């Protein structure tokens, strides 16, 4: 990977100008000014070009006042520690010192001042060589990527550098003495643990990563860093420092290309849009702590029995500045940021607390449905978290239903089979959400122990007017009946849609036709409303329109 070091490049250009000017002045028999230019070339790695010109002029004037030999003697004493034989000797030493400065600049990051990959690789190589003949424990190299750097640089490069510098200072502050912290890429840092015990080094690296992800104060605002970590060890994984570093950083790589070597061109996001998106992500990281999340509940009704079965718990975010933010906007961001487990646990706990209230108010037979993401399914501790949450609120497992999309269940088939079996044994109900909108794999539906199939709104909308939607829903209802699954039609909005679905054999519904999502208090008020319960009873007693169902069936067989 090529690393750009702008400071070293500018230093060489300015030094060349100064030395060329010195050559011209010597040719013009003005050695005092030549000495000034030579020293200016030596200082250029630290000062601006204007500063070099000023220093040159000052030295030239000094040479006129004190005499060229006096200035030469003083420079020789300072740089050589002895008298100089000639101006060339002083100039040669100045050039050598400038090269040394260039070398050091190329091995220190210009923003953070940390060593770059070359010194790190040299240190790794030296440590390994010193222990090669011994039986020392494996060495650990950890890599941490500050993911937010590129995002910040997209709209404010100065702010990005400020955040990068503070992030680097934090890493150095929390890393024990004797470890080497280096910056090996624009947003990537490495920690070399030397001969530390492997397990102890891993634990220490986890602690470093934990602290690195804490909130930072940047330019009057707050930033919760997004980080990625990886670690590799020696000698099992090789004994070359550069190879070790490449392994560690490669594990952090985010895919940027398509399949088959295809390069995906991505449109450049406008500065304001990039800033707004980044701030939205930062606010999401703090939303739980700042009590900005709420839960609403949309009733699920059974018209065959004329009763409310429970409700689906739906997450809402009330941003302090933007106001209510659509779930379609913030839920994908939550998943992309890796916050699904944190948000999912909050939703599970809040939903179970509300279900406890239902039971206390006399509605103990109702069930609350909670959505699970694919990332939550991969959590090995999910079953334990569910058990503890139910116990904390004094709920039986039958009070909880977990909804999963088809895509989520396919993330890890073996783990999913095991988890579903455990949950079903506990008594938790399982529902496949938005069926028909994803892969629609019948083998998964057959093999996984689902209790309920939810027909996606896409097929329910205007079913009374669309022959294709009726055909799909009829097939899904028959499929559910054959697999002994309860079938729910979600998103119903009109009486005509309900009548058509009932005629096709579906009797469990969720949608605005019955109720919009409600706050916990309003949901309990609706459940206790005798007039609303009466309307459900009337609807349940109304027979399905068999004539309509038969006519639709005849249409489908034509």
Image (cartoon, grey):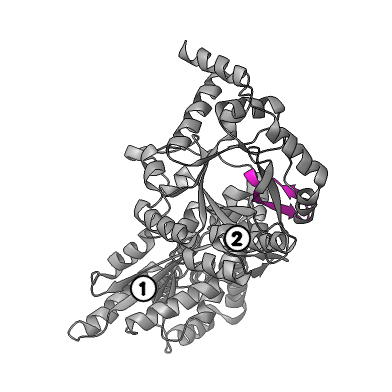
* Residue 511 horizontal/vertical position (percent): 68, 38
Crowd tier of the residue under label 2, counting other residues whose Cα lies within 10 Å: few below 14, some 14–19, many 20 or above: many
127 up-or-down from 3: above or below: below
Q: Residues within 10 Å of mark 1 (few under 14, many from 20)?
A: many
Specify whether 132 is left or right of 329: left
Give coordinates of residue 204: x percent, y percent.
44, 80
Residue depicted at 55% across the width and 17% down the height = 550
Q: Quadrant of the N terminus?
A: bottom left
Which of the numbered marks, if any, corresponds to residue 141?
Answer: 1
> Between 88 and 169, which is closer to the camera in this rendering?
169
In the picture of the structure, the residue carrying the numbered disc 2 is: 348
Q: Which residues are magenta?
A: 310-328
Q: Disc 2 vs disc 1: which is toward the camera?
A: 2
Q: Is residue 37 visible?
A: no
Q: First in sequence, mark 2 or 1: give its number.
A: 1
Q: Nearer the viewer, residue 553 or 119?
A: 553
Q: Residue at x 51, y 27 (%)?
A: 474
């Amino acid at each position: 990977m090529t690393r750009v070091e702008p400071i070293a490049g500018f230093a060489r250009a300015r030094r060349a100008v100064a030395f060329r000017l010195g050559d011209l002045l010597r040719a013009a028999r003005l050695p005092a000014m030549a000495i000034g230019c030579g020293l200016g070339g030596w200082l250029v790695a630290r000062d601006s070009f204007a500063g070099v010109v000023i220093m040159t002029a000052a030295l030239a004037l000094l040479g006129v006042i004190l005499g060229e030999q006096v200035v030469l003697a003083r420079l020789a004493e300072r740089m050589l520690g002895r008298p100089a034989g000639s101006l060339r000797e002083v100039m040669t030493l100045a050039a050598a010192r400038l090269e040394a400065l260039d070398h050091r600049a190329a091995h220190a990051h210009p923003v953070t001042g940390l060593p770059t990959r070359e010194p790190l690789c040299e240190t790794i190589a030296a440590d390994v060589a010193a222990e090669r003949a011994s039986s020392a424990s494996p060495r650990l190299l950890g890599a941490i990527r500050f993911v937010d750097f590129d995002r910040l640089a997209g709209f404010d490069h100065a702010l990005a550098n400020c955040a990068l510098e503070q992030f680097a200072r934090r890493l150095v502050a929390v890393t024990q003495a004797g470890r080497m912290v280096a910056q090996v890429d624009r947003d990537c840092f490495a920690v070399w643990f030397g001969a530390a015990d492997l397990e102890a080094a891993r634990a220490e690296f986890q602690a470093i990563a934990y602290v690195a992800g804490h909130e930072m104060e940047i330019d009057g605002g707050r930033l919760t860093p997004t980080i990625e970590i990886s670690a590799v060890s020696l000698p099992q994984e090789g004994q070359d420092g550069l190879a070790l570093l490449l392994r560690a950083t490669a594990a952090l790589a985010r895919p940027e290309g398509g399949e088959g070597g295809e390069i995906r061109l991505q449109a450049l996001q406008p500065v304001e849009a990039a800033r707004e998106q980044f701030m939205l992500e930062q606010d999401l990281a703090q939303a739980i702590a700042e009590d900005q999340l709420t839960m609403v509940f949309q009733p699920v009704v059974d018209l065959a029995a004329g009763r409310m079965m429970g409700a689906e718990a739906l997450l809402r975010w009330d941003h302090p500045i933007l106001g209510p933010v659509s779930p379609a906007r913030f839920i994908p961001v939550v998943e992309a940021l890796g916050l699904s487990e944190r948000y999912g646990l909050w939703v599970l706990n809040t939903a179970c607390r509300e279900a406890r209230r239902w039971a206390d108010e006399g509605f103990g037979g109702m069930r609350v449905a909670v959505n699970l993401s694919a990332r939550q399914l991969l959590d090995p501790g999910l079953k334990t978290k569910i058990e503890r949450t139910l116990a904390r609120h004094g709920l039986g497992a039958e009070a909880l239903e977990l909804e999963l999309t088809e895509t989520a269940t396919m993330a890890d088939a073996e783990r999913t089979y095991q988890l579903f079996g455990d949950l079903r044994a506990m008594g938790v109900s399982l529902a496949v959400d938005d069926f028909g909108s994803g892969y629609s794999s019948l083998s998964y539906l057959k093999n996984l122990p689902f209790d309920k199939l939810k027909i996606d709104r896409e097929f329910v909308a205007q079913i009374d007017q669309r022959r294709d939607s009726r055909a799909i829903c009829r097939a899904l209802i028959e499929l559910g009946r054959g697999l002994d699954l309860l079938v729910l039609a979600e998103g119903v909005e009109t009486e005509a849609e309900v009548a058509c679905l009932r005629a096709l054999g579906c009797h469990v519904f969720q949608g605005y036709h019955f109720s919009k999502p409600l706050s916990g208090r309003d949901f309990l008020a609706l459940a206790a409303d005798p007039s609303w319960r009466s309307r459900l009873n009337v609807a349940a007693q109304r027979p399905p329109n068999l004539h309509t169902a038969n006519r639709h069936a005849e249409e489908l067989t034509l």
